[in-house]
Image (spheres, rainbow, N blue to C red):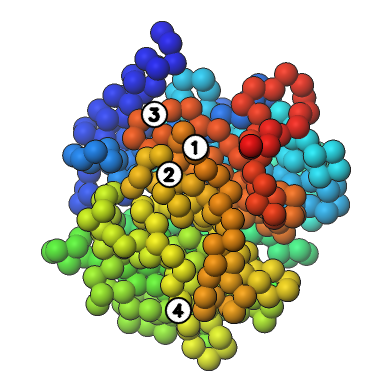
């Protein structure tokens, strides 16, 4: 059977799963691959870089799916995918990989060596026993240089894992961590979490945002901490408004913050495809207390639509809200990058998909428009430079599969704190597939500034991985490697 036949078989299998699954209220969280097998630690070297291809919710139009494509660095609610460590002058990164048939999700880890300009052959840390890219991994590194891979799960049908490198700054061998959480004063196994975003605060430990299914909202957003990555705190609920939330998060110098929307429960717009309003909360004491951007103390979980964390009311404007990134300025104040649209389906009927920034000035939220693109799941990252320049790297330009996620990648720049934006460079062009989900590394080095993948927007395909430097030069990670260390391939 050739690759084309295998990809066709894969697509038909996914379609059957989609059609037979309970598509509750047009949910974004339809499980098309319900496997209960235990994830297996592999610790083998891959022969190159292949990203997972994934789709969600077929549509009865030419755009085929609500979203789809090469989603190795998906979702926006997973973070981080890459971290630069000056101690070894390397950027470590993880992604959702696969085999030649796209038959399973492999949690991969590798690094870019800034001294040599080369990348290592990726290590297959874990076979997640699914093809659902919602189970993509994220990466963290502690003070001692041990690398952690947090293997999240899409809901409760599969277990989650934490794996740790056996040696500091070494990607060759990982072992599962027997993670526990505190629950009712007792230590219990922590083997399920979704949409995980894990940050490391030097000399304190892990600050982690995630989603808990069904407690008490369908999607309750939560927070936990750990000093060692093994023994975790109680799960603190951040918000449980109506049907629940999606959230993104980030770390500043002395602050951890979350931006989120909520899912209405009205008869007209009931379910997880509907998401509106923009909220922001933060902690400055490792999760002991929480506040709005203006310092107003918050009692968690938030359960009312109107509350002090509300950044902007989009419900009254009948708009969906899709969060992309949070960053902090030189005064340690948050800037949120997000997209609004008229509805969840792919296609021009829900235009415009407008990119915005919401900046906290110290007194109020200032919201500015940036540009428009053609899909709700176009995803990019926001960079706040030491010289005050703001940059966005995102697939804002029309790609070979218009109105499917991603497109051609461009770099945008603002020199007035987001009031006006200028497209300074198109990083890709003439591509065969859409590029999507550009991710910003923690402490991003100018030589490895963003990482993403590509893939066909309307049918299963192979998926390559790419990174760019700060100047906008793009390099492809080698699809096939014959050496342990090789140079990435510059795009012409």
Residue 89 lies, with reference to residue 232, above or below; the image says above
Tag 2 and tag 1, C-beta contact below 8 Å: yes
Would residue 63 be found to the left or right of residue 139 on screen?
left
Mark 3, Cα crowd under 10 Å, few <14 / some 14-19 / many 20+, is: many
Q: Secondary structure at mark 4?
A: strand
Q: Secondary structure at mark 3?
A: loop
Front: mark 1 or 3: 1
Identify the residue position indicated by label 3 in the image: 460
Tag 1 and tag 4, C-beta contact below 8 Å: no
Mark 1, Cα crowd under 10 Å, few <14 / some 14-19 / many 20+, is: few
Identify the residue position indicated by label 2 in the image: 399
Front: mark 1 or 4: 1
Q: Residue furthest left?
A: 267
Identify the residue position indicated by label 1 in the image: 431
Whichever of callouts 4 and 3 sits on the residue coming sooner in the sequence is: 4
Quadrant in the picture for the N terminus: top left
Task: Using the numbered discs, state the Cα–Cα distance from disc 1 to disc 3 in whole angstroms.
Answer: 16 Å
Q: Secondary structure at mark 1?
A: loop
Front: mark 3 or 2: 2
Whichever of callouts 4 and 2 sits on the residue coming sooner in the sequence is: 4
| Nearer-the-camera pick, 326 or 414 | 414
Q: Which residue is at 43% across, 72% downward?
A: 369
Q: Secondary structure at mark 2?
A: loop
Mark 2, Cα crowd under 10 Å, few <14 / some 14-19 / many 20+, is: many
């Amino acid at each position: 059977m050739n690759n084309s036949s295998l990809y066709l078989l894969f697509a038909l299998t996914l379609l059957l799963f989609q059609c037979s699954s309970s598509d509750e209220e047009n949910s974004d969280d339809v499980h098309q691959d319900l496997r209960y097998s235990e994830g297996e630690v592999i610790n083998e070297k891959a022969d190159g870089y292949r990203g997972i291809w994934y789709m969600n919710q077929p549509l009865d139009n030419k755009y085929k799916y609500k979203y789809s494509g090469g989603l190795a660095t998906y979702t926006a609610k997973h973070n981080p995918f890459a971290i630069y460590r000056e101690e070894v002058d390397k950027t470590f990164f993880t992604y959702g990989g696969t085999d030649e048939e796209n038959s399973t999700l492999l949690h991969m880890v590798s690094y870019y060596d800034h001294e040599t300009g080369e990348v290592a052959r990726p290590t297959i840390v874990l076979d997640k026993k699914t093809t659902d890219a919602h189970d993509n991994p994220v990466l963290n590194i502690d003070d001692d240089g041990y690398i952690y891979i947090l293997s999240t799960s899409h809901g409760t049908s599969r277990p989650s894992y934490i794996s740790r490198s056996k040696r500091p700054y070494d990607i060759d061998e990982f072992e599962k961590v027997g993670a526990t959480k505190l629950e009712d004063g007792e230590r219990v196994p922590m083997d399920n979490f979704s949409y995980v975003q894990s940050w490391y605060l030097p000399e304190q430990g892990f600050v982690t945002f995630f989603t808990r299914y069904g407690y008490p909202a369908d999607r309750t957003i939560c927070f936990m901490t750990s000093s060692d990555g093994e023994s975790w705190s109680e799960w603190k609920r951040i918000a449980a408004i109506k049907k629940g939330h999606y959230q993104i998060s980030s770390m500043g110098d002395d602050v951890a913050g979350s931006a989120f929307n909520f899912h209405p429960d009205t008869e007209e717009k009931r379910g997880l495809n509907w998401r509106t309003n923009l909220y922001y909360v933060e902690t400055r004491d490792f999760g002991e207390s929480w506040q709005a951007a203006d310092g107003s103390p918050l009692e968690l979980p938030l359960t009312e639509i109107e509350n002090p964390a509300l950044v902007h009311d989009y419900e009254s404007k009948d708009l969906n809200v899709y969060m992309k990134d949070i960053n902090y300025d030189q005064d340690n104040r948050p800037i949120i990058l997000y997209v609004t649209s008229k509805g969840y389906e792919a296609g021009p009927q829900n235009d415009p998909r407008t990119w915005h920034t919401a900046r906290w000035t110290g007194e109020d939220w200032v919201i500015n428009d940036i540009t428009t693109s053609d899909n709700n799941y176009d995803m990019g990252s926001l960079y706040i430079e030491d010289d005050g320049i703001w940059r966005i790297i995102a697939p804002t330009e029309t790609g070979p599969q218009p109105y499917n996620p991603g497109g051609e990648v461009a770099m945008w720049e603002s020199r007035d704190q987001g009031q006006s934006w200028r497209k300074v460079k198109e990083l890709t062009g003439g591509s065969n597939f859409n590029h999507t989900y550009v991710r910003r590394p923690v402490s991003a080095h100018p030589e490895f500034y963003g990482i993403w993948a590509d893939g066909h927007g309307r049918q299963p395909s192979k998926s390559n991985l790419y990174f760019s430097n700060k100047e906008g030069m793009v390099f492809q990670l080698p699809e096939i490697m014959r050496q342990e260390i090789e140079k990435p391939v510059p795009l012409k």
